[in-house]
Image (tube, rainbow, N blue to C red):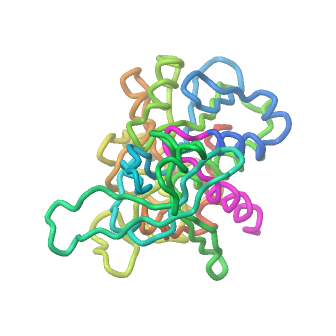
């Protein structure tokens, strides 16, 4: 029963798309939509993918971000060592000594393979920024199309673990994108009695840029915004369960509080009631981090972040439960119809 979710999530997580380089993910999401939805989906000026359905009243927005954390080229030394800057927040030490991919063409997945050069982190209080080497000198790299701003990531392969678990890099926020696609597949647009706008947003990891653009477009017409994003959970062997504890496999999580927003208690109760009537298990929790929905609050919308529990967020080995993501897709569909 989880095969459909697993196949779609694997397709999206194995797609490379760091912040500002989301074209391959836009293509992948658009291709995964049913024909009727694909025909009605448009790309806005910020690179967001937008699908607007239903009559123009009581607008609800569902937003999941297309981008992942990664790096960009900032310079090339004569010997070919490439200087890098982070795009999004993560521990650089997790990338040292790992396979590096320097992306030449985002859509064809043409890339040079290399390695992230290990740094001296044992005796240096402020280790230098990450660098990478691809076996070519600067002239050869430039001849291949490498430039300042080129995207750099590390190789990844999505893998199922046992019956329901799933590991990959960039499950954040490919699981949210998957849930939105699953919800659209399940919806009959003729059954909608209010406006429902699905947004697959850009550049969330570096400042909610895509969400800011969408919020300024839809403005005060939005009554509620549901940010479909990771719930960074402490459900792992070495962490305390006192904060951000949402066990994997027990359903989606509505965030009551995070670093960027406070969900009105009445909205938490409303989501819980809809989930209960839809037969969807639901957890309620607080965690760190922000969400795309906070960009809509200044226009008067209620921000209601909903996600799935994730272990080891922003690492090369994130872990989620496929049952949670399947249930999240069902919950999004139920909220859209309510």
Is residue 209 part of the magenta span, yes or no? no
x, y percent for residue 289: 34, 50
**Where, by quadrant of the figure, is residue 50 drawn?**
top right
Residue 248 visible in the current orientation: yes
Residue at image position (58%, 41%) is 22
Q: How many labels does the image show?
A: 0
| Foreground pick, 232 / 264 | 232
x, y percent for residue 249: 55, 71
In this rendering, position of residue 43 left or right of residue 121: right
| Foreground pick, 151 / 275 | 151
Above or below, 2 against 74 in this view is: below
| Foreground pick, 313 / 134 | 134
x, y percent for residue 338: 64, 37
The N terminus, quarter of image: bottom right
Residue 227 visible in the current orientation: no
In this rendering, position of residue 178 left or right of residue 151: right
Above or below, 149 against 234 in this view is: above
In this rendering, position of residue 13 left or right of residue 2: left
Is residue 3 part of the magenta span, yes or no? yes
Residue at image position (38%, 67%) is 117
| Foreground pick, 290 / 46 | 46
x, y percent for residue 92: 34, 62
Q: What stretch is highlighted in magenta?
A: 1-22
Q: Farthest residue toward the right?
A: 35
Above or below, 61 against 249 in this view is: above
Residue at image position (44%, 57%) is 231
**Where, by quadrant of the figure, is residue 280 drawn?**
bottom right
């Amino acid at each position: 029963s989880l095969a459909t979710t697993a196949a779609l999530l694997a397709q999206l997580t194995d797609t490379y798309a760091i912040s500002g380089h989301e074209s391959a993910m836009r293509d992948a999401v658009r291709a995964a939509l049913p024909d009727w939805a694909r025909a009605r989906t448009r790309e806005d000026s910020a690179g967001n993918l937008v699908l607007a359905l239903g009559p123009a009243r009581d607008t609800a927005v569902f937003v999941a971000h297309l981008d992942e954390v990664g790096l960009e080229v900032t310079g090339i030394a004569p010997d070919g060592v490439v200087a890098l800057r982070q795009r999004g927040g993560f521990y650089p030490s997790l990338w040292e000594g790992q396979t590096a991919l320097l992306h030449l063409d985002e859509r064809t997945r043409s890339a040079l393979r290399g390695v992230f050069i290990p740094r001296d982190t044992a005796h240096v209080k402020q280790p230098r920024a990450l660098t990478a080497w691809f076996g070519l000198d600067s002239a050869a790299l430039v001849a291949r199309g490498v430039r300042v701003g080129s995207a750099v990531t590390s190789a990844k392969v999505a893998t199922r673990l046992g019956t329901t678990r799933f590991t990959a890099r960039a499950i954040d926020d490919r699981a949210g994108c998957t849930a939105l696609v699953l919800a659209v597949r399940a919806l009959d647009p003729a059954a909608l009695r209010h406006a429902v706008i699905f947004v697959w947003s850009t550049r969330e990891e570096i400042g909610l840029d895509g969400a800011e653009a969408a919020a300024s477009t839809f403005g005060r017409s939005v009554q509620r915004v549901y940010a479909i994003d990771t719930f960074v959970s402490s459900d792992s062997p070495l962490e305390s369960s006192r904060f951000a504890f949402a066990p994997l496999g027990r359903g989606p999580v509505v965030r009551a509080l995070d670093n960027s927003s406070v969900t009105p208690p009445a909205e938490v109760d409303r989501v819980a009631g809809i989930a209960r009537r839809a037969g969807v298990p639901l957890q309620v929790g607080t965690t760190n981090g922000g969400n795309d929905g906070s960009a809509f609050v200044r226009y008067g919308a209620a921000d209601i972040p909903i996600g799935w529990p994730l272990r080891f967020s922003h690492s090369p080995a994130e872990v989620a439960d496929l049952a949670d993501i399947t249930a999240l897709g069902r919950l999004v569909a139920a909220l859209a119809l309510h």
